[in-house]
Image: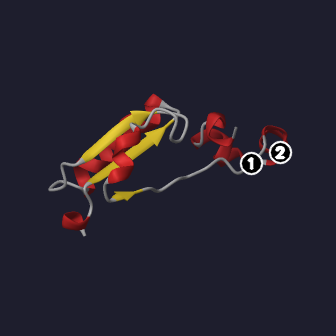
Amino acid sequence: YQEKIDKLILTDISAEALEVAKENSKKYFQKFNKIDFIVSDLLTDVPKDIFNKKVLLVANLPYIPDEVFEENAESSTKKYEPSLAFL
């Protein structure tokens, strides 16, 4: 699959989350060196010329509104998931 992708772009609004992603990529994508990590609100800061290439876009979008997160999220979710991920 690696030869079919020109570039893998990972974006997150959280620089801390991208640092974790960088560490994970060292473990799981050792031979794939075409990864860019961009602090961005989804595609806001992604260079537009990248869409002229074969790009794999994967998103983990927020899915719990603030008020629901604060009132209903399990304690383990609150402990391990940043509330920023649910905005």
Q: Quadrant of the C terminus?
A: top right
Q: Is residue 35 left or right of residue 39?
A: left
Compared to residue 3, the image places residue 55 above or below, namely: above
Q: Which mark is residue 64?
A: 1
Q: Amino acid at mark 2?
A: Val
- Residue at 55% x, 35% y is 41
Determine the secondary structure under disc 2: helix
Q: Residues within 10 Å of mark 2 (few under 14, many from 20)?
A: few
State the residue in front, 60 or 53. Answer: 53
State the residue in front, 12 or 16. Answer: 12
Task: Identify residue for label 2.
Answer: 68
Q: Quadrant of the N terminus?
A: bottom left
Q: Amino acid at mark 1?
A: Ile
Q: Are marks 1 and 2 in contact (CB under 8 Å)?
A: yes
Instruction: Residue at the far left: name it.
Output: 31
- Residue at 18% x, 49% y is 33
Residue 78 is situated, as x and y percent measured from the top left of the image, at 67, 41
Residue 26 is situated, as x and y percent measured from the top left of the image, at 23, 47
Residue 79 image-quadrant placement:
top right
- Residue at 37% x, 44% y is 21
State the residue in front, 70 or 85. Answer: 85
Residue 47 is situated, as x and y percent measured from the top left of the image, at 39, 36
Q: Which mark is residue 73?
A: none
Instruction: Residue at the far bottom: name it.
Output: 1
- Residue at 50% x, 41% y is 43
